[in-house]
Image (spheres, grey):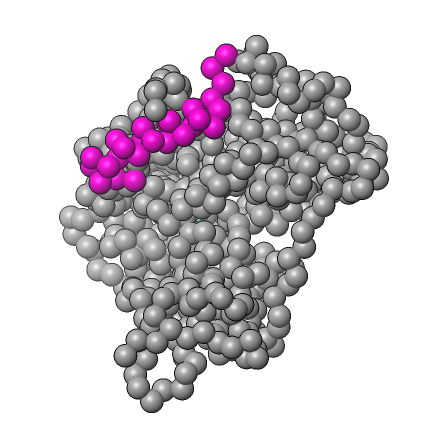
Amino acid sequence: MLWCIQLGDNVPGALPRGRSCARGPQTFPPGLPSVSTVTYVITGSCCKDSSCIPVCPVQCIRPRPGDPDFTTAEQLYIDPATCIDCGACMDECPVGVIHGEWDLPDELGEHLTLNRDYFAANPIEASSPPDRVRRRLPAGRPVLSVAIIGTGPAGCYAAAGLSEIKGVTVSMFDRLPTPFGLVRAGVAPDHANTKLIAKRFQSVLGRPNVRCFFNVEVGRDVAIDELLAYHHAVLWAGGAPDDRQLAIPGEGLDGCVSAREFVAWYNGHPDGTGRNFDLSGSRAVVIGNGNVALDVARILAQPVEVLGPTELADHALEALRHSTIADVVVTGRRGPEFAAYSSGELVGLDRAGIAMRAKPDEVRGLSGSGDRSARVLAAAAATPDPGPTRTVTLRFGLTPESIEGSDRVEAVTFRRADGTTEVIEASLVVRAIGYRGRRVPGLPFDELAGTFSHRAGRVVDPTTGEPVPGIYCSGWIKRGATGTIGTNKTDSAETVDSLLHDLEVGGLADPTYDMGQLDKFVRSRQPDVVDKDGWSRIDQAERSAGRASRRPRVKLVTVEALLAASRMPA
Ligand code: NAP
């Protein structure tokens, strides 16, 4: 028999009247109590943007922003003892990784235990949902216009927070003809769920008080001061476009590339188009132990049949088809207990069916701990030579000392803690040691951190500590290249709070020029500006090209092709 449970108003955690069971009718055997014991489970690719938390009527999702372990937790968890099976979190999840127990894929089954274990260690008292605070502009300041530079997660979350306030107008700028920053060009193409967040961001761009100026480079086509003349504030969310450097001999040899370049190439970022990476050797070394290192390793090691149905750029797919790389060695300078990758990503590598290897003496310290990474590493260390199949070898305690080669990369020399060295031959070396922000002329920059100097998102002059009037920042340029997509939500909320506070206390000057003239001004500098409609035509063109081959989209990978699509008749 099919039942759809609608709790009454007198039941703690009841759904609001009139709301139907989000999952539709569910099956319960006769004789069971009328409240379900089914629970929901958040799985490993949780984006942590916390959208699920306020919609949960019984507040059983942890950790919440502000909880001590929110920043360090790899994901959010649902308390099975408190969950009332309303499904609201599942509907709200922007990346589609919340499953009901009944539809949890077998390979994600361990998440049931992970969720339970989290609450065994961090028991909660059920509480009521936080009041949703509807923000308003201060009395006497009924309008606010903000230019946001960068349309990645930080820019989109800032735009979302600002544009839901009556009286606010947001102008979004991106140097590319396409929005969404690293969601489009950073998140690996085989992480399709994570890319679903773009739908959320698309709905923000669609708001009538959000205007889009893509293919406009601030600093080249228009200056920050010029934007400030049309807006009350400029919020820089341009990310971290540079790489950290190893600063070791041989780093400049052909065949030693940054993960940023490699990721741009396989993701169809126009900056990566036309690049060639030599995949004709037998081994690649990836330096670094973060999530980007694992992304690169997975793309290099996965069969092209798996990557084919994704939105991986066609040129990369073709090159990977002919790749002879048989072993991808991922190297961490410290032990596995200090690895920067999340255990979910390591488990994901294992689940992708890639043969993994590790050296027993390098992972021994971790293998007793019973955690997920430890299990994967212990299994990898126990795996006999997998033969002629592609492998990812995880190595630890290896500090890169020099890159060897006469005119191109031939090997990497590593130093171990005991002073001995090891040479690993490779024809491709990918440095995945992190990204770095870039100085923007005219704005204070913290060279050591590679970020803007700021206080709670207000860009400040480090010598005086005084804010630079009207200039704000969020995302990687504010906090460094750390965190997941959702981290940008709290980060941008802090900046938006600072901006609104400054408006309230009279800290923001009125713009000199009428916003109505902005479009004309921008077009006078960059006639090829791509607006919302232009982006929509690009999106349609890519998606319809994808439909023919059952892929989410076929990416257009040059600015010229993107601009041509943006002008196509609908
Ligand atoms: P990361 O997490 O900062 O990792 C950088 C790695 O490089 C660390 O293992 C670090 O080792 C190592 N490293 C730094 N300098 C080094 C040197 N001189 N020699 C050798 N190793 C060095 O950076 P990332 O992997 O680029 O990721 C950036 C951010 O994006 C992270 O927050 C990441 O979680 C996020 N991201 C997330 C996902 C995902 O959720 N699926 C995917 C991609 C990226 P030490 O720890 O020893 O310093």
Residue range in magenta is 527-552
Query: In the figure, 361 relative to 489: above or below?
Result: below
Q: Residue furthest front?
A: 18
The quarter of the displayed image where residue 492 is located: top right
The reply to whether residue 425 is visible in this rendering is: no
Tally of numbered tags: 0
Query: In the figure, 243 relative to 347: above or below?
Result: above
Q: Residue furthest left?
A: 388
- The location of residue 408, given as percent across then percent down, is 33, 25
- The location of residue 557, given as percent across then percent down, is 34, 25
Q: Residue furthest bottom?
A: 31
Left or right side of 147 for 206: left
Q: Nearer the viewer, residue 169 or 320?
A: 169
Q: Residue at x 79, y 28 (%)?
A: 509
The quarter of the displayed image where residue 559 is located: top left
Left or right side of 462 for 163: left
Q: Nearer the viewer, residue 395 or 417?
A: 395
Q: Quadrant of the C terminus?
A: top left
- The location of residue 353, given as percent across then percent down, is 24, 55
Is 531 inside the magenta-drawn segment? Answer: yes
Q: Residue at x 68, y 18 (%)?
A: 226
State whether the magenta stretch is mostly helix, strand or loop. Answer: helix
The reply to whether residue 296 is visible in this rendering is: yes
- The location of residue 389, given as percent across then percent down, is 18, 49
Left or right side of 422 for 211: right
Q: Quadrant of the N terminus?
A: bottom left
Is 473 inside the magenta-drawn segment? Answer: no
Q: Residue furthest top?
A: 524
Q: Nearer the viewer, residue 96 or 209?
A: 209
Query: In the figure, 150 relative to 296: above or below?
Result: above
Q: Residue at x 59, y 21 (%)?
A: 218
